[in-house]
Amino acid sequence: MLVLRAASKVTRPMFSSSHESYEVDEMYTFIGSKNTACYIVYAINRKTRQVFDFITGSRSKEQIGGLIRRLLLVAPAKIYTDRLNIYKSLVPRSVHRTFQYMTNRIERMNLTLRTHLKRLVRRGICFSRSAVMLEACLKLYMWGKSSPKVH
């Protein structure tokens, strides 16, 4: 309960600068048991390496579309993704890029998340018991006052 209370006080930072470049990627973890997969899809600013926003749930067009729509509101210069087919239909062609080495920062962030939050490890016995707790831990890690920066 302490984690949920602390996470309720954390707010998503406001992004006022436009024409920045962002990276979007997804990673999977488990909720409730090792039989229930859950995806974390998030976007980071390439320059500041700050997490713009994230969603948890399925890797569906509706779920990822919500994140992409919020990202498009800040008028990004470029959005770099991997070659997942869903991104082609959600991100406008004028800003979408799928270069192999342009998602290095977010891939490094995936590894850092898995190292720092044991509930995200693929082959371990740790996992979140509920989606609410997973989101609370991610909010505290990504947007808490002492959130680490990946360099």
Image (cartoon, helix red, strand yellow):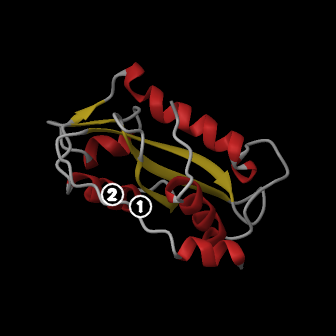
Residue behind mark 2 = 65
SS at circle 2: helix
Quadrant of residue 5 within the rendered picture: bottom right
Q: Are marks 1 and 2 in contact (CB under 8 Å)?
A: yes
In front of the other: 130 or 113: 113
Query: Most extreme residue toward the left, as rendered?
Result: 94
Of 4 and 103, the residue lying toward us: 4
Q: Which residue is mark 1?
A: 63
Asked whether 31 or 126 is in front, the reply is: 126
Q: Position of residue 118 (x, y in %)?
A: 75, 49
| Residue plotted at (63% across, 62% down) | 137
**Crowdedness near tag 1: few (<14), some (14–19) or many (≥20) residues, C-alpha within 10 Å:** some
Identify the residue at horizontal 73%, vertical 43% (top origin): 122
Give the distance between the C-alpha atoms of the residues marked 1 and 2, in whole angstroms. Answer: 5 Å
Circle 1 SS class: helix
Residue 3's place in the image compared with 125, above or below, is: below
Point 25% across, 45% down: residue: 91
Percent position (x, y) of residue 59? 48, 53
Q: Judge from the rendering whether residue 150 lies leftward or rightward of residue 3; answer left or right.
A: left
